[in-house]
Image (cartoon, rainbow, N blue to C red):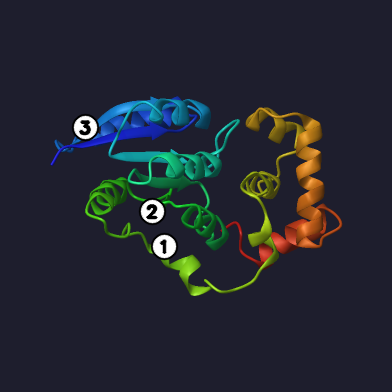
């Protein structure tokens, strides 16, 4: 069975690496590639692929928002989300928004091939990280109340990025980032950056 794959990642070298690795599987071919969520959504409005491999963190319309919008118009599209972070919070955000699987970018390349075939067969992506959100599926934690964009900003803050750097990466204004930051502090019941880092460590949002 031939599988058409689209790749969405804002790093050219990452996309090139995926394409090269996929070339070793005669059943997989890359039909399209994108460097942001807007391009991805626009293409899928008029085209089709079997699988979309998409990074969660991209400039502008991020992966989570693109995931949600695509699932509303292409419910049969299989989408596997990728992230530098494999914490329960990140995985849960992806799965709750309709992802058919999640892989950490630190995963072995063979895992991505397995994930593609598993998703096409209707199976859960066989990744060790998939069990993390299931363990606490009913846990009520403040960060679960964050919007998709707020969660992405939270992850950027957790990485030590400044609001200005986040604004540049996400293609939004500094003011918008500060507004998100204010909402994040309020929802997480923290008052400053030190308390935010403590919250992130306590809930293992970055591992």
The alpha-carbon separation of the residues under discs 3 and 1 comes to 26 Å
Q: Residue tagged by mark 1?
A: 130
On screen, residue 25 versus residue 37, left or right, reads left
* Residue 83 percent location from the top left of the image: 49, 46
Categorize mark 1 by other alpha carbons within 10 Å: few (<14), some (14-19), many (20+).
many
Categorize mark 3 by other alpha carbons within 10 Å: few (<14), some (14-19), many (20+).
few
Q: Is residue 71 above or below residue 14?
A: below
Which of the marked residues, 3 or 2, is nearer the chain's N terminus? Answer: 3
Q: Residue tagged by mark 3?
A: 23
* Residue 119 percent location from the top left of the image: 28, 52
Q: Residue tagged by mark 2?
A: 101
Q: Residue at x 43, y 44 (%)?
A: 71
* Residue 53 percent location from the top left of the image: 38, 40
Q: Residue at x 66, y 27 (%)?
A: 171
In terms of depth relative to the viewer, which is nearer, 82 or 107? 82
Marks 1,2: beta carbons within 8 A: yes
Which of the marked residues, 3 or 1, is nearer the chain's N terminus? Answer: 3
Which of the marked residues, 1 or 2, is nearer the chain's N terminus? Answer: 2
């Amino acid at each position: 069975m031939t599988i058409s794959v689209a790749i969405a990642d804002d790093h050219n070298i990452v996309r090139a690496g995926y394409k090269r690795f996929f070339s070793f599987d005669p059943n997989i071919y890359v039909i399209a590639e994108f460097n942001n969520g807007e391009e991805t959504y626009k293409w899928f409005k008029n085209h089709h692929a079997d699988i979309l491999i998409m990074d969660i963190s991209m400039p502008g319309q991020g992966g989570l928002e693109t995931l949600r919008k695509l699932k509303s118009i292409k419910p049969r599209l299989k989408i596997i989300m990728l992230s530098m972070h494999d914490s329960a919070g990140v995985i849960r955000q992806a799965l709750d928004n309709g992802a058919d699987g999640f892989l950490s970018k630190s995963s072995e390349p063979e895992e991505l091939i397995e994930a593609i075939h598993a998703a096409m067969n209707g199976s859960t992506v066989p990744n060790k990280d998939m069990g993390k959100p299931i363990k606490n599926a009913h846990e009520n934690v403040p960060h679960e109340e964050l919007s998709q964009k707020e969660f992405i900003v939270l992850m950027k803050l957790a990485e030590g990025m400044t609001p200005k750097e986040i604004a540049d990466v996400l293609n939004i204004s500094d003011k918008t980032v500060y507004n998100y930051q204010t909402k994040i502090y309020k929802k997480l019941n923290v008052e400053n950056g030190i308390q935010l880092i403590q919250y992130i460590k306590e809930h293992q949002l970055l591992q």
